[in-house]
Image: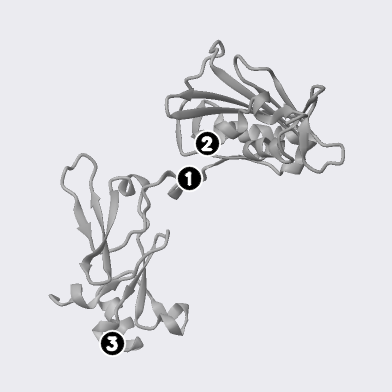
Amino acid sequence: NAGLDEAIRVMPQQATYLSWLDLRQLGLDVPQLTHWLTAAGLALSPGHWFGREGAGFARMSIAVEPEVVAEAIVGNARHDGIGIGESGTYVRRPNDEQAWLADADLGAGVELADWVNVQLFETRREDVKRVTVTVPGEELLEIVRAPDRQGHTLAAIPDGMKLKYVNVVDQVVRAASAIDFSDVRKSQMQAEDDDVATVVIELEGGLEATIRIKREGDTAWLALDVSGEGEAKKIADDMNGRTQGWEFSIPKSQVREILKRRDDLLEDVSS
């Protein structure tokens, strides 16, 4: 039917393999529509099966074998590309130079966070017992939980020195307690590298996270290794199973917050 492509509208999808077709322009009531679908040999589910609001629609599964799905490369969306208020999405097949504007907003983002969980490490700050920061060429920085368990402080503050402001140490713990990544690559850091900073985070329950950070130009790369005993070992094994053999790019602003020097935290009492 030459008019079907205009009468049938594909509804925008939201991260699903089920597609809804708007068939109301066909002008068929529910019994007629059900008969039409059956006669056409279409394996679609009439929308009224899923509630009264589904009348006039049909649901179609577009699930196929993984290798078939992988043949479609989704590009950027083009607003009003199909018509006023109707967006389209550029798609192409692998190795093809020609891209086509599909008559649908596929809702496929191009950012890493649209496809994977970018949370690399997260813990409650109140569960952090100790943080040790080792930066090449700098004095070791040891942070411990405050005696009243309200925040954190330096393990030792030299005579005549004080913290620059109340929560300056807590900012380090906060930055190290929640880390998201923006890129990933195969491990490249070597044990003998002398430009790698190390951060060790000791948690309640026996879990210990060792973070190695290396700056490369405008990028900072991080490697994570977690250890523990008993129940903590199960958590550590699960985390290592996802991170071992990989390095993760994290914001340099966060690296600056984590890799503080003593001079960044302390000042003369007289100041």
Can you identify the residue that label 1 sits on?
Answer: 116
**Left or right: 2 as drawn, with respect to 84:** left
- Residue 195 x/y as whole percent: 53, 16
Q: Which mark is residue 91?
A: none
Per the image, label 3 sits on a secondary structure element best described as loop
Which of the marked residues, 1 or 3, is nearer the chain's N terminus? Answer: 3
- Residue 243 x/y as whole percent: 55, 32
Can you identify the residue that label 2 sits on?
Answer: 253
Which of the marked residues, 1 or 2, is nearer the chain's N terminus? Answer: 1
Label 3 Cα crowd, 10 Å radius (few <14 / some 14-19 / many 20+): some
Amino acid at the residue labelled 3 = Leu
Q: Residue furthest right?
A: 148
Query: Residue at the location (31% across, 62% down)?
Result: 105
Q: What is the spatial separation of the Cα atoms under label 2 and label 3, in whole angstroms?
A: 60 Å
Q: Residue furthest left?
A: 2
Q: Quadrant of the C terminus?
A: top right
Q: Quadrant of the N terminus?
A: bottom left
Of discs 1 and 2, which sits in the foreground?
2
Q: Is residue 230 visible?
A: no
Per the image, label 1 sits on a secondary structure element best described as loop
Amino acid at the residue labelled 2 = Ser
Above/below status of 205 relative to 160: below
Which of the marked residues, 2 or 3, is nearer the chain's N terminus? Answer: 3
Amino acid at the residue labelled 1 = Val
Query: Residue at the location (55% across, 12% down)?
Result: 194
Can you identify the residue that label 3 sits on?
Answer: 28
Query: Residue at the location (43% across, 83% down)?
Result: 53
Of discs 1 and 3, which sits in the foreground?
1
User: 15 and 47: which one is in front?
Assistant: 15
